[in-house]
């Protein structure tokens, strides 16, 4: 019997014969969930490390795979791993557009200054609006 099989048998025995301990161990493991994103490196990339609930992890994996596949179908020639990382960024940006609690997300500000610098521009012969004497 290998170590992995032995550990599974012990875990099964704990669940069956000591359910209180099993629940306490499950709760303690749940408290260990986290997501950590490092500062950008010199290439503008960040490392992500996380521990998720199994269902959340499967859902995230499925979502990344679906989006990465779609990116490939849309002509993105990057590797599957690169497309999955791009898909994770897409998920984040889509959430930020929801503006759930006033979170600004990334914003683009466009300042547009329009001036008429053409001296030969023809001026209208009259202003738009009601004809004189009509109201």
Image (cartoon, rainbow, N blue to C red):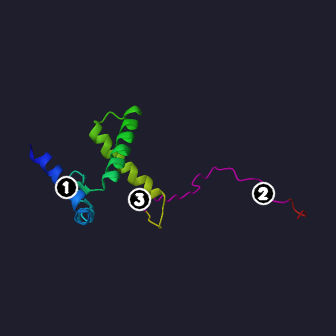
What residue lies at 39% left-to-right and 49% top-to-bottom?
A: 90
Disc 2/disc 3 C-alpha distance (Å): 41 Å
Mark 2 against mark 3, which lies toward the viewer?
3
Furthest-right residue in this view: 133
Residue segment shown in magenta: 105-130
Give the number of the disc on residue 128. Answer: 2
Q: Using residue 73 as the reference point, say whether residue 125 is left or right of it.
A: right
Q: Position of residue 25 (x, y in %)?
A: 22, 63
Report the residue at 9% width, 47% height from top. 3
Secondary structure found at label 1: helix
Mark 2 lies on a secondary structure that is: loop
Check disc 2: other Cα within 10 Å, few if <14, some if 14-19, many if 20+.
few
Residue picked out by circle 1: 13
Horizontal placement of 87 versus 13: left or right? right
- Which badge, 2 or 1, is on the more N-terminal residue? 1
Q: Residues within 10 Å of mark 3 (few under 14, many from 20)?
A: few
Q: How far apart in space, not on screen, are marks 2 and 1 (Cα)?
A: 88 Å
Front residue (pair 106, 134):
106
Viewer-proximal residue, 42 or 88?
Answer: 88
Q: Are marks 3 and 1 in contact (CB under 8 Å)?
A: no
Q: Quadrant of residue 106?
A: bottom left
Residue 78 position in % (x across, y down): 30, 36
Question: Which-is-in-front pick, marks 3 and 1?
Answer: 1
Question: How far apart, in angstroms, are the residues tagged by discs 3 and 1?
Answer: 51 Å
Q: Which mark is residue 106?
A: 3
């Amino acid at each position: 019997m290998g170590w992995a099989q032995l550990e599974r048998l012990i875990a099964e025995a704990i669940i069956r014969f000591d359910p209180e301990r099993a629940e306490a161990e499950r709760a303690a493991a749940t408290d260990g969930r986290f997501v950590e994103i490092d500062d950008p490196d010199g290439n503008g990339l960040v490392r992500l490390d996380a521990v998720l609930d199994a269902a959340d992890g499967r859902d995230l994996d499925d979502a990344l795979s679906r989006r990465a596949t779609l990116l490939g179908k849309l002509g993105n020639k990057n590797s599957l791993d690169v497309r999955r990382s791009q898909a994770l960024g897409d998920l984040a940006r889509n959430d930020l557009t929801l503006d759930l609690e006033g979170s600004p997300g990334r914003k683009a500000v466009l300042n547009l200054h329009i001036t008429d610098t053409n001296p030969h521009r023809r001026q209208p012969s009259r202003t738009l609006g009601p004809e004189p004497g009509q109201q």
